[in-house]
Image (cartoon, coloured by chain):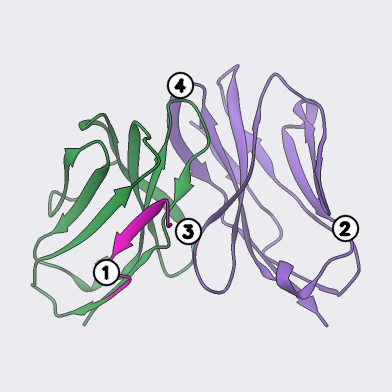
Amino acid sequence: DTAVSQTPKYLVTQMGNDKSIKCEQNLGHDTMYWYKQDSKKFLKIMFSYNNKELIINETVPNRFSPKSPDKAHLNLHINSLELGDSAVYFCASSPQGRAIYFGEGSWLTVV
Amino acid sequence: AQKVTQAQTEISVVEKEDVTLDCVYETRDTTYYLFWYKQPPSGELVFLIRRNSFDEQNEISGRYSWNFQKSTSSFNFTITASQVVDSAVYFCALSGFGNEKLTFGTGTRLTIIP
């Protein structure tokens, strides 16, 4: 069973559309994250939630809105998609103060 | 501010050779964590190790070993007797103690030539 799972794995969409990426973890971890990996492979944190509360928001455009309905889920909604949003988005989770485990990534291409 | 530098952008070695990936970090925190992750061609990020700043003991796991030198702010990763399956991009990362935001290096692309 995949510990941190994200859907969809691949997403191709047009500029201006709104899309969501879902993430679920079955590890019982308290903290979940979204990271973005750009075309140069650079990885940067976007958001972090602990027990459904936002604790890190790294200067991400407000077109990106995370939602955590419960501590096992952290979804990422993106409004008015732009070409520069094309990237790989990684969901991750960790128990407090421990190693961070990543999902398999969601490849978003905006055309 | 935290910073992680992986100066080696790409490395190629012939299979069975040993290879060391360098990682140098900067932080003002007195306690922190260091990590290594592997990203194979399939794209997922695989956790390899987490080391806390007050434990400088080197660690070995099979063909992998890590050398943590606080005096030089380095956390280098060595693969012994490399195999083709080791071909991947390897990321070093840093987080504060109690602050779980990972700051990543830019990665080193390792290619093992059969």
Q: Is residue B28 magenta?
A: no
Image quadrant holding the C terminus of chain A, namely: bottom left
Location of mark 3 (residue):
A42
Give the SS element for disc 4.
Answer: loop
Dot 4 or dot 2, earlier in sequence: 2
B44 lies above or below B50: below
Marks 4, 1 in one chain: no
Residue B61, x across and y down, in percent: 79, 45
Q: Is residue B59 left or right of residue A26?
A: right
Q: Is residue A90 left or right of residue A76?
A: right
Location of mark 2 (residue):
B80
Q: Nearer the viewer, mark 4 or mark 1?
A: 1
Name the residue rendered at 59%, 68% in the picture: B40
Query: Alpha carbon of mark 1 to alpha carbon of mark 2: how far?
Result: 37 Å
Query: Alpha carbon of mark 4 to alpha carbon of mark 1: how far?
Result: 31 Å
In which image quadrant can residue A33 be found?
top left
Residue A82, x across and y down, in percent: 18, 70
Query: Alpha carbon of mark 3 to alpha carbon of mark 2: how far?
Result: 27 Å
